[in-house]
Image: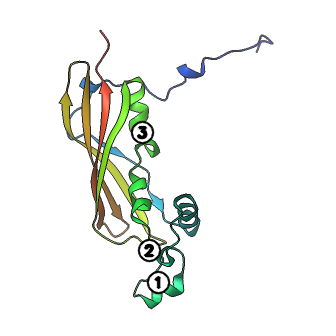
C-alpha cells in the first residue's frame, strides 16, 4: 500500500452499466425488495403525510370499525412500488430523463404487520426520435399472495447516444 493520496470520481461509481431505451424488452421484470408494514413505517408515513385519521394509528378505533389492525393509507402502499427501492433506476442510469406518470388501483386492504411484495414489469415501450417512454405495470402482493395494488409507472428514457 502506498501513502499517495487516492482520489475517485463519485459520478463514476455505479452498480451497473446504463441501459438505453432500446435495450429493454416488454415483459422484463424488476423486483423490489419486500417490506413488512411495521408500526414505525405507519408512524413515519403519518408524520410525513400529515394524515391523522384514526384508522391509521388507533387500534381501538380500528377494532370498533371492524378492522383487524391499523389500515395502511393508500399512498403508503403506492410508495412500495418506488423504483428507487430496487435495481431499475440503477440500470436506467444516465438514460433516465424523468418519471412522467403514475396511476394505481387499490384491490385489497393492507394492515400493520402485512409483508408486501412489489414488482415492476415492462408492459409497453413507445419510441420517439431521441427518447422513448417505458411503461411498467406495478403490482403489489401481500404475504398471502393476494394482489393489493395494480397500477403503472411511465418513464422517459434517452436512446443510445450516437
The quadrant of the picture occupied by the N terminus is top right
Q: Helix, strand or loop at disc 3? A: loop
Q: Is residue 4 above or below residue 159?
A: above
At 24% from the left edge and 27% from the top edge, which residue is drawn?
Answer: 132
Distance of mark 1 from mark 2, alpha carbons?
Answer: 8 Å
Using the rendered view, name the quadrant where residue 83 is placed: top left
Snapshot quadrant of residue 86:
top left
Query: Mark 1 to mark 3: distance in Å?
Result: 36 Å
Identify the element where label 2 is drawn.
loop
- List the residue tagged with mark 3: 87
Residue underneath mark 1: 62
Q: Position of residue 68 (x, y in %)?
A: 43, 83
From the top left corner, tell me how far across and down residue 125 is, in percent.
20, 33
Choose the circle earlier in sequence order: 1 or 3: 1
**Mark 2 and mark 1 in contact (Cβ < 8 Å)?**
yes
Which residue has dot 2 on it? 71
Q: Earlier in the sequence, mark 1 or mark 2?
A: 1
Q: Position of residue 133 (x, y in %)?
A: 25, 32
Amino acid at each position: 500500500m502506498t501513502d499517495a493520496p487516492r482520489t475517485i470520481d463519485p459520478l463514476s461509481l455505479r452498480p451497473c452499466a446504463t441501459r438505453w431505451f432500446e435495450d429493454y424488452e416488454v415483459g422484463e421484470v424488476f423486483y423490489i425488495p419486500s417490506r413488512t408494514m411495521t408500526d414505525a413505517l405507519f408512524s413515519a408515513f403519518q408524520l410525513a403525510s400529515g394524515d391523522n385519521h384514526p384508522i391509521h394509528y388507533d387500534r381501538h378505533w380500528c377494532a370498533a370499525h371492524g378492522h383487524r389492525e391499523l389500515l395502511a393509507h393508500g399512498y403508503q402502499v403506492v410508495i412500495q412500488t418506488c423504483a428507487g427501492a430496487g435495481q431499475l433506476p440503477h440500470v436506467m442510469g444516465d438514460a433516465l430523463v424523468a418519471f412522467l406518470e403514475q396511476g394505481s388501483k387499490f384491490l385489497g386492504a393492507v394492515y400493520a404487520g402485512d409483508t408486501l411484495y412489489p414488482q415492476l414489469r415492462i408492459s409497453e415501450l413507445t419510441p420517439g426520435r431521441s427518447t422513448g417512454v417505458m411503461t411498467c405495470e406495478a403490482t403489489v402482493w401481500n404475504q398471502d399472495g393476494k394482489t393489493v395494488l395494480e397500477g403503472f409507472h411511465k418513464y422517459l428514457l434517452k436512446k443510445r447516444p450516437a
